[in-house]
Amino acid sequence: MAKKTAQDDPLSPVTLAVGQEDLLLDRAVQEVVAAARAADADTDVRDLTSDQLQPGTLNELTSPSLFAERKVVVVRNAQDLSADTIKDVKTYLGSPAEEITLVLLHAGGAKGKGLLDAARKAGAREVACPKMTKAADRLGFVRNEFRVLGRSATPEACQALVDSIGSDLRELASAVTQLTADVEGTIDEAVVARYYTGRAEASSFTVADRAVEGRAAEALEALRWSLSTGVAPVLITSALAQGVRAIGKLSSARGGRPADLARELGMPPWKIDRVRQQMRGWTPDGVSVALRAVAEADAGVKGGGDDPEYALEKAVVTIARAARSRQG
């Protein structure tokens, strides 16, 4: 979950969201925008990528308005700003404008560290949005999601949800929201199994499983069913990516017991056994081809193409062929 500094006013002049977890970064932005619009429904929101914030742009956006309107200026990937634009931002940090909230999204790390340090020195409100690479962190995230929604879920249910869905925080958050909306009372392991095993035919992970097993026809059928039942295309590309990466990780890992490999690779033991069965037809070249196909599909469903469904179908077919590359 995102962690905040003691200065926890979303309408602070500057909010610094640091990390690489996209869901948490988006939530940091949404929190500021919601607070601004609660104070002024006509708040103007400008959401910019680093290449859109050119030298002089920030000054234009933060100049006093005739109508003194409240404004939120969001700058994504601030670590990629040009040197001249960073100078503009540092100057602004020294004297932020009233009624304007600047939100800087920064990946952290060495790149753009000067801007990061300057924002902290200026007293920016900071929200930590670290990538959740450990299963324990994702489990904590799920527990907190239920807590925020005011619902009770057993520890076994939370663990089952993480084991069933995997590492994608957006899909984990979506699953928690669905369960709390559909189920009354305490959510237990049986409820999770009913939703995420009993409805496997509509799951993005079923699409991925069939594709990495080389079963193209079944993967396409599962894909079309998932899309028809409202599964977001971005969740399907995420599942495909996880499926292919799991093949790559396990194929390059040293042999050993599932429990040992589970600790080494960050997968539950049951998944090690499944991936071992799925990886029989794969080669290193096949994994590379499949990863490129997933990347192209991901770009296609996020606005880089005209037809997200075609982008997904193409990726599924390519992955299924790659799964049989050893036989080919």
Image: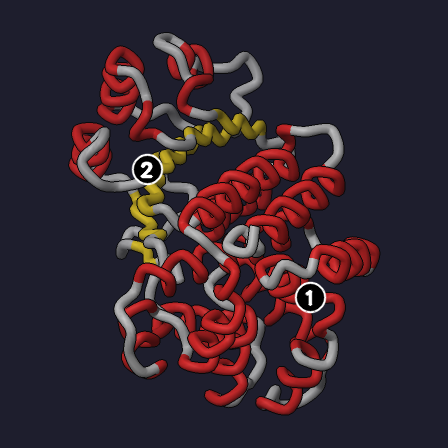
> Which residue position holds label 1?
203
Who is closer to the viewer here, 290 or 266?
290
**Image quarter of residue 135:** bottom left
> Which residue position holds label 2?
106
Under circle 2, the secondary element is: strand
Tag of residue 242: none
Is residue 45 at all visible to an observer of this figure? yes
Identify which residue is drawn at 62% across, 69% down: 175
Q: Position of residue 192 (x, y in %)?
A: 62, 82
Who is closer to the viewer here, 97 or 264?
264
**Mark 1: which amino acid?**
Ser
Q: Position of residue 224 (x, y in %)?
A: 80, 54
Is residue 32 at all visible to an observer of this figure? no
Relative to 3, 223 lies left or right: right
The correct choice, above or below, for 123 with respect to 264 in the image is: above
Identify which residue is drawn at 74% across, 39% down: 310
